[in-house]
Amino acid sequence: MEFSAVSSALKTIGEVTSLWGVDEQVQGLANELRWMQSFLKVADARRVDHEVIRTSVVEIRELAYDAEDVIETFSLKVASKRKDGFSNCIKRSACFLKEGCLLHQIKSEVEKITVRIKELTR
C-alpha cells in the first residue's frame, strides 16, 4: 500500500522544531496521520483489494501530501524567521501582524486537513 506519502508527512512534522502558535493542531494532525498509516499497514497485511480501500488509499495519499505542504509552508515562512538575536527581534516585531495572519492561515489549513481525515475515517 501507499506508506511513503504518510511517512514523508510524519517526517516533515517531526523536523519542524518551532511550532509556537500551531503546536496543538499539528500534533492532532500527526496523530491522525499515524492512524492512517496503521490503516494502510493492516489493509496491506490482509491483502485487501476492494474498490473502497483503493479509493481510501488515494484519498489518504492526497491528504498526506496536503499536510506535508502546509507544514513545509509553516517551516519556510514562519519558523525560519524565528531566530534568536536582537536584530531578528526587531525585524520580527515589524512583521508581527503579517506573521500572526500567516499563523492563523496555517492553523486553519491544518484544521481543515484534520477534518477531512476524520470524514474519511467515518
Image: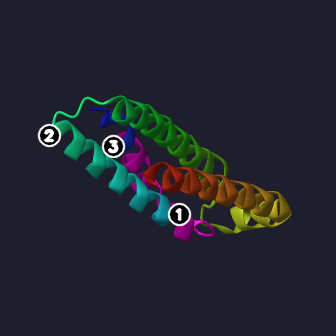
Location of mark 2 (residue):
45
Spot occupied by residue 74 in the image (x, y as percentages of width and height): 61, 51
* Predominant secondary structure, magenta span: helix
Q: Assess whether residue 8 is covered by the magenta stretch.
A: yes
Residue 49, placed above or below residue 26: above
- Front position in the image: 74 or 61: 61
Q: Residue at x 32, y 35 (%)?
A: 4
Q: Residue at x 80, y 65 (%)?
A: 96
Residue 57, placed above or below residue 116: above
Tag 1: amino acid = Ser
Location of mark 3 (residue):
7
Mark found first going from the N terminus, 2 or 1: 1
SS for dot 1: loop
The CA distance from mark 2 to mark 1 is 36 Å
State which region is magenta. 7-26
Residue 91, placed above or below residue 86: above
Tag 2: amino acid = Ala
The CA distance from mark 2 to mark 3 is 17 Å
Spot occupied by residue 30 in the image (x, y as percentages of width and height): 42, 58
Mark found first going from the N terminus, 2 or 3: 3
Number of residues whose C-alpha sits closer than 10 Å to that of mark 1, classed few (under 14), some (14–19) or many (20 or more): some
- Front position in the image: 39 or 53: 53
Where residue 28 is drawn, which disc sits there? none
Classify residue 118 as left or right of residue 47.
right
Tag 3: amino acid = Ser
Q: Assess whether residue 25 is covered by the magenta stretch.
A: yes
Q: Residue at x 58, y 56 (%)?
A: 115
Q: Residue at x 70, y 69 (%)?
A: 86
Location of mark 1 (residue):
18
Displayed quadrant of residue 8: top left
